[in-house]
Image: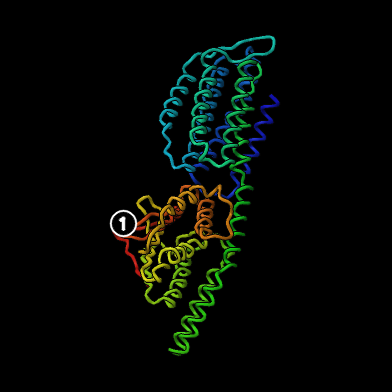
Amino acid sequence: MRMEIALLLILAFVAGRYFSGERRPTLLHRTFSALLAAALVHLALDAATLYTVHHLTEVPRPVNDLLHRLFVGSMVVVICLFYRYIAILVEEETGKPRRLDLAACVFLAAAELAAMALPVQYAVTPQGNYADGLQANVCYASTAFYLLLCAWLLAANWRQLAQRERRAIGAALCIELIVCVLQGLHRTWLISGMGITLMTLAFYLTLEDPEILRAELTEQKLSMLYLKSQINPHFLYNTLDTIRIQAELNGDREAASLLLRLADFFRLSVKTDRTMVTLDDELELAEAYTELMRCRYPQLRCEYDVDPELGAAEVPNFILQPIVENSLLHGLQDRGYQGEVRVCARRTAQGRLELSVRDDGGGFAPGKKAEIDELLARYARSPQKLTGSSIGILNVQKRIKLLCGKEYGLSYEENETGGVTARILLPLGEEKEWKSCASCSSTTRS
């Protein structure tokens, strides 16, 4: 009884820290939240049934039976939620659909029905009492079934999962397997609550601890500060030289305009005190950059097609300009910057924000598309890069995934007519009210 109370207090403390942490309500986090709540209920029922099973003559039989039915039913729910959490985690990391969900749901319904319908039996022994019979064995059958599903997911996707995720899932499965074997061999030990608590802690301490998430955010912010402090000096010097030439040839008005845009660019690019900014801020920074590039390369065309109602949407800071710069440097540089880059922002049918940067350059070199896809898919396992050609897109991908959720992020596709399109998928705030798509208009900037 003391152990169950201690486990309940430990899990309550974990739940308090978890629910107090700031995070976006992604499907994975909602599932872990449900898992914590279900585990707390299960531990409370575990403590209650531990008392009643040892006081069979004092507690009315209907009350005892009801508590044991709820205990078994709650355990099935908890183990099913463990499977669901692992399945969602694997789906987010690999992109593979959750094909085992139907079987998991059908088994859950059958197990809950059995827990409520089968007769409850009790074994009375000198070492202690415990629930016995088919109804009690629903726990063992459910645990074995869901552990097999989880083990299959882990084995089938071993190489595609990060080391930290493999360790968390593997540790949780080993813990529950050991506890089940010990419980099966010693039916009077009644240690199922220990297995549930240790499995929950395995995921919490390795994947869901708010302190880990805050540390990752700090790392990303420091990386972004470094990036912003390492603005290519050649870009600065070439632009200033262009301004000087324009000042000599055309007078002070145009030079002043260019100086203003250069000042805007640096003013906006050093907004490091905010993790999230408005889309308008991101677009203004990208426009300042492309206008300066157009001054150096007059045959470069830059278009902006943006739904005006999206301007106030919050997006991670400093994600658009690096992608625009990447399109220019890798898409149009070999063509002398003769071509077009088109930036679009729209609301998708699923109520999300999609930013796209499309160029009509030479496209990917052979094998480069697969390399970029691999880099973006394995962003969590890629070390934070401070040099190299892919530094910008890797940094953008990591910050989007961390700030917005793993279902969002950056991807690339080749255009049928030539060139490349970068797509950034972001969430839109649920509190905003949007007009129907039919009434939405767009504005074009150049």
Tell me: 273 left or right of 396.
right
Looking at the image, which residue is at 48% across and 51% down? 376
Q: Residues within 10 Å of mark 1 (few under 14, many from 20)?
A: few
Looking at the image, which residue is at 55% across and 42% down? 162
Residue 405 against residue 278 in the figure, above or below: above
**x then y, percent, for residue 364:** 40, 57
Looking at the image, which residue is at 51% across and 26% down? 148
What is the quadrant of residue 186 in the picture?
top right
Residue 117 against residue 150 in the figure, above or below: above
Q: Which residue is mark 1?
A: 416
Question: Residue placed farthest to the front in the image?
Answer: 366
Looking at the image, which residue is at 51% across and 75% down? 264
The quarter of the image holding the C terminus is bottom left
The colour mode here is rainbow
Tell me: 102 left or right of 260.
left
Question: Residue placed farthest to the left in the image?
Answer: 438
Q: Amino acid at mark 1?
A: Glu
In terms of secondary structure, where does tag 1 sit?
A: loop
**x then y, percent, for residue 261:** 48, 77
Q: Is residue 134 visible?
A: yes
Question: 112 or 299, which lies in front?
Answer: 299
Question: 278 or 342, which lies in front?
Answer: 342
**x then y, percent, for residue 50:** 64, 21
**x then y, percent, for residue 295:** 43, 78
